[in-house]
Image (cartoon, grey):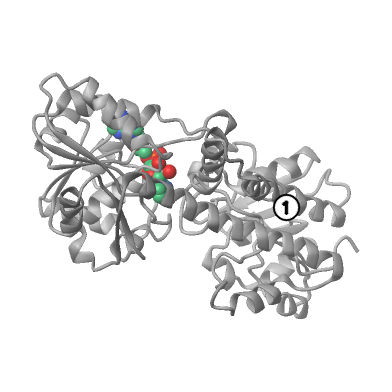
Amino acid sequence: MNICVIGTGYVGLVTGTVFAELGNDVICVDKIAEKVDLLNRNIMPIYEPGLEELVVRNRNEGRLSFTTDFKKSVEAAEIIFICVNTPPMDHGETDLSYVKAVAKEIAEAINGYKVIVNKSTVPVGTGDIVSEIINANNPKNHKFDVVSNPEFLREGSAIQDALHPDRIVIGAPTKEVAMKLLELYASLEAPMLITDVYSAEIIKYASNAFLATKISFINEIANLCEKVGADVEHVAKGMGSDQRIGRAFLNAGLGFGGSCFPKDVQSLLHTSTKLGSEFALLKNVLGTNSERAGHFAKMIKSRFPDLKGKTFALLGLAFKSNTDDMREAKSIEIINELQKGGAKIRAFDPVAMEVAKKIMPDITYCQNPYEACEGADAMILVTEWREFKLLNLEKIRTILKQPVIFDGRNFYDPVRKKRLGFEYFGLGRNKWPK
Ligand code: NAD
């Protein structure tokens, strides 16, 4: 099939590449010429495991190309995927200006029947908005249908997720239109849910909001554990063994960040409120989440009451492991809090430092975790990169000024850390404040 993917960010680039891998002819369009230029030189603008290899192979085999030429790409395609950003505005409302601009450009380029698929995460009713814009700017009245096909991939495992999705949701106006998408996805052999456009749009928000709720729930339980000296990891294990609950997303820590959960929860809350159905639960999910970094910083300050002249080794800057995405990363909040008190930060992240330097130019970036820990007053784990599990802790203990670890992701085993001579602070694992 001839496919056009508009927007080559995390979603568009991965989706377009995977469609090419499945044997389709794919043109990816972006309005940022530098990005397109990088991709045409086989340089990835984002870090995503396995991406480069797939892009190079599919480009070499002639199934995948990158361009800024919107018109030509739309003209050549049977199916057009909209994968542009949908950032939050004030009061949590979703900024649809990028989606609307794309709809107008499609209308101006349309040259025959097209299936237009919204893969961007958009509030319920956006499919109608896209249709209205195309109808209003399509003088030759070319036929088209708008489909909602939300994306569930996770940064850090995006290729795997796109090749082996838990489910594919297709919200289409008719069975015939849904069949077009079914055909495209058939070789993935994933469970498919065919539904109407509104339901598909809501499924994406409901899924992310539910996962965010699990995270805030376990973080509230962590707060309770700190009051009595229980261990939230044991509680999560005990809860998660119940098949009705499940262990996934019951990880107490610094809470959720990134480009999706915070904005999607805010957007769902905004949509519900606008439609007259106040979703109070979601307000609390966001409230709990917004307190996590401050709570952790307080824990650090209770051990180091005077931050002036203190230096901290901060391991992990990205909002989660296996990505260089710094959007809504908890590291930013924690660093701000510590700097406010006069502390200095020596940071290391395996891939996010180049992105982080643009946001936080005033911290010291180190070559590796050991360089960050050299002479620091304590080590602070913020992002759960697997390689931080394999650190030589005997060495860390000798190079830190004081053997203190603050573990923002409950990543380490406290018993082992204490045996190695560390003072260990996790979230929901110590009686705190003592
Ligand atoms: P992104 O910011 O990484 O990429 C968006 C791309 O769209 C950018 O490269 C931008 O230049 C391009 N763009 C914007 N307007 C354009 C236009 N008129 N013409 C051509 N290109 C244009 O965003 P992302 O993280 O890939 O997210 C895209 C959408 O997918 C969002 O709605 C997001 O909520 C959703 N989503 C993201 C993830 C994720 O993990 N990042 C997962 C699922 C869904």
Mark 1: amino acid: Phe
Quarter of the view holding residue 102:
top left
Location of residue 235 in the rendering, given as x and y in whole percent from the top left corner: 70, 74
- Please, what secondary structure does the residue beneath circle 1 have? strand
Location of residue 367 in the rendering, given as x and y in whole percent from the top left corner: 55, 54
The quarter of the picture showing ligand 1:
top left
Total count of labels: 1
Location of residue 274 in the rendering, given as x and y in whole percent from the top left corner: 54, 33
Q: Nearer the viewer, residue 301 or 362?
A: 301
> Horizontally, is 31 left or right of 343 in the view?
left
Write the residue at 37% across / 57% down. 158
> Horizontally, is 244 left or right of 184 in the view?
right
Residue 424 in the image: above or below residue 100: below
Write the residue at 61% across / 45% down. 279
Q: Using the rendered image of the protein, determine whether residue 46 is visible from the camera's viewpoint.
A: no
Residue 19 in the image: above or below residue 409: above
Quarter of the view holding residue 227:
bottom right
Location of residue 26 in the rendering, given as x and y in whole percent from the top left corner: 16, 46
Write the residue at 54% across / 58% down. 211
Q: Nearer the viewer, residue 186 or 329?
A: 186
> Horizontally, is 156 left or right of 143 in the view?
right
User: Mark 1 — residue?
Assistant: 312
Write the residue at 32% across / 45% down. 197
Q: Nearer the viewer, residue 413 or 355?
A: 413
> Horizontally, is 401 left or right of 72 in the view?
right
